[in-house]
Amino acid sequence: MAKRKGITRRELVTGVAALAAYSQIGEAEAFPPNKFVTLLGGARTPSWLPAGFAGALNFQTQQAYVVGQGYIPFSPLLTTARTTPELVTDYNGNVTVVGNNTAAISNAGLQIYGATTNVVLWNNDGTNAAWTKTNCTAALDQPAVTSDQTPNTATSLTATGANATCLQSITLASSARFHTAYVKRMVGSGEIDMTMDGGATWWPVTPYLNSSGYTRLSIPGKTLANPQVGFRIVTNGDKIAFGLVQNENHNFPSPAIPTTSAAVTRNQDVITGTAALRALISPTTGTIYEAYGTTYAPPAGIWSLSDGTTSNRMDVRSNQTGLAGSFITVGGVQQSGINVGSQGSPGSIAAAVMSYTTGSQQLAVNGALATPGTPGSIFASPTTMHFGQLAGNTNPLQNNLLVFAWSASALNGAAAQAMSAQAYFSLPANTIFCWGDSLTAGTEDGTNITYPNVLSTLYAPARLTENMGVGGQPSTAIVGRFLAAPFTWNYNSVLWLGRNNTSQGSTVQADIASMVAKLGLSRSLVLAVLNGEGEGSSSGTVYNNITALNAALSSTYGARYLDVRSMLVAAYNPANPVDVIDHTNDIPPFSLRAIDVTGTISTATVNPTDTAFSVSVSGLAANFILTVGTEYIYVNAVSGTSITSCVRGYAGTTAGTYSSGQTFSGTDNIHLSAAGYALVAQWVAAAAGY
């Protein structure tokens, strides 16, 4: 159980931070904000307002500040249109309901999600006939998941035999689906699984459960028709509680929607700035700062100012994974369009700065600067300001907006770039930053499950974890990003560096040392560098470089070093023949690595002795392992969509004969699966002491 940090004298003096901290520990009524501000000598400028800016809306601390007016409510500045309720989670982990046409502000900021429908019926009541129970009994005897704790409104499920199941069948056309549920362990310690394909695939959720409260769990997204959703309790006598089960047409989770006898749709969050807010912001010269959660569903709007159409507009948007952009259009003619590719992986927090004036437009995101634009004109008479949408209420952010700030001055490129590398918002003190490369960025298997977001769920209440992973980066690039973001140095951090420059062991050690020097040893946990398929104990240089580097890191950091490489090797499945080979060769196991390529064989006929053939997709590489039916094929070499050399019947399997159209899956040589990242998260949580 995570402990709540008490308020410090330093926080008290800063005013805003202390007020936020008091509200988090339940003292708001006993110590009202107006009295607090009076004791501090009036409404002081908050630390999170950028220097020279005229005002800001901080949705994490739930405060608005305007120079000359002081702290003011959100209500004169924002309008929310959403004709359905929405659930939010507060700083203490409580799930609460906000009503129609009310901004949904959670511990992560202002929620801005598109419309979605939960197709699971009676999603709190497992006793209903919509749920088919086998070897288990259900009772509607648990308090609600939501903070009102209404008695007898959530379900307990008790196994009366092994492999007990509680399933609901849903008639639905084929579509991309994402599945979540709030679950709590009540009795036992055996395996608990979730499914949305009737048990064709069971996803273990055991590591994420706790008995002190509900945890929202998710399983990898999948495209399928007629989902069959539910739970399996493997051990007789074990017992869980569940509520707010949700299955929606996304590849990511959105706020839960309660249902009874019919599917329920939550409408889109439409957040607009009032005339009072628009009057504070110059439409022709200025600078806009936004801190936001990177979208899961690009393209998405972050902020826009327009006449309600796309003909006259100025906006900041998330164009695609990693790429942010900004456009200025007047009279239907694009005046400027600029992009910068530094936004980060979906779900990570990004900071964007966009400045504008006739003849110059700048965009910087996370410390990277776009090539400037040169708008010939800027629309001077906007009537609509959208948050988390583009003009016309389109392309919702599908995430949270943390901070929006504005200035009447147009920053130059260098100033915009510097500002975008800072964070003018208050993160919870127990936030954990996870620095690294693609092993931290994760999601090679398309599940959106990474070790940082699993780590978040292993605390009660859940903590904010910041995924600072960028694929392909050597340790020097990662430390460069870290040193450019000094606001992160006061937070606990996990450092997983070095996979992309294993031949430079002393450089990796120096880079990690520079990060630990800024953080302090107690706020640092250093993870071992992984080796992959083809880099086993008999492979030579790469393996030797990695083991020597890990030995040096272990010697330097002692208890603040976690040997996840050896732990993964030990977690092999002795019933899987490829895992057995990997274990013998001291390689993290095949069964915990990502399936990140799927396709079909293109060659007309592949005979058992054929070691070269074509496939329908690119993305395979040497040391990938294909699963074709019951055969494993070890890939030695690839050219485009052609496998030019491979080992047939790998790991003692029987080589088969295949025709064009035969499906296969390709397992990555290094990156982990959702299950592998979940193990890493468990080990980090246990070792870090954060």
Image (cartoon, helix red, strand yellow):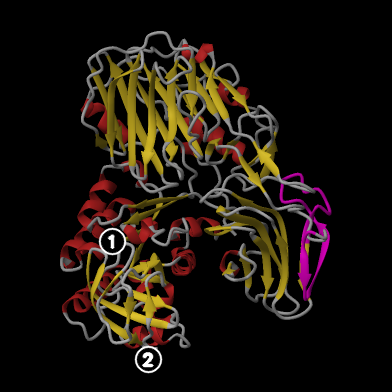
**Residue 227 locus on image (x, y percent):** 64, 59
Q: Amino acid at mark 2?
A: Gly
**In the image, is 437 to the left or to the right of 84?**
left
Dot 2, crowdedness within 10 Å: few (<14), some or many (≥20)?
few
Query: Which residue position holds label 1?
Result: 497
Q: Is residue 376 above or below residue 591?
A: above
**The quarter of the displayed image where residue 515 is located:** bottom left
* Residue appearing at x 52%, y 41% in the figure: 108
Question: Is residue 430 something that shows in the picture?
Answer: yes
**Residue 208 locus on image (x, y percent):** 58, 64
Q: Which stretch did the figure color magenta?
A: 130-155
Mark 2–mark 1 distance (CA, rounded to whole Å): 35 Å
The residue lying furthest to the bottom in this view is 652
Q: Amino acid at mark 1?
A: Leu
Q: Is residue 415 above or below residue 514?
A: above
* Residue appearing at x 46%, y 55% in the figure: 448
For the residue pair 270 and 227, the one nearer the viewer reads as 227
Q: Is residue 521 above or below residue 40?
A: below
Earlier in the chain: of badge 2 and badge 1, it is 1
**Residue 544 locus on image (x, y percent):** 20, 79
Query: Which residue position holds label 2?
Result: 652
So how many labels did they put on this image?
A: 2
Q: Quadrant of the N terminus?
A: bottom right
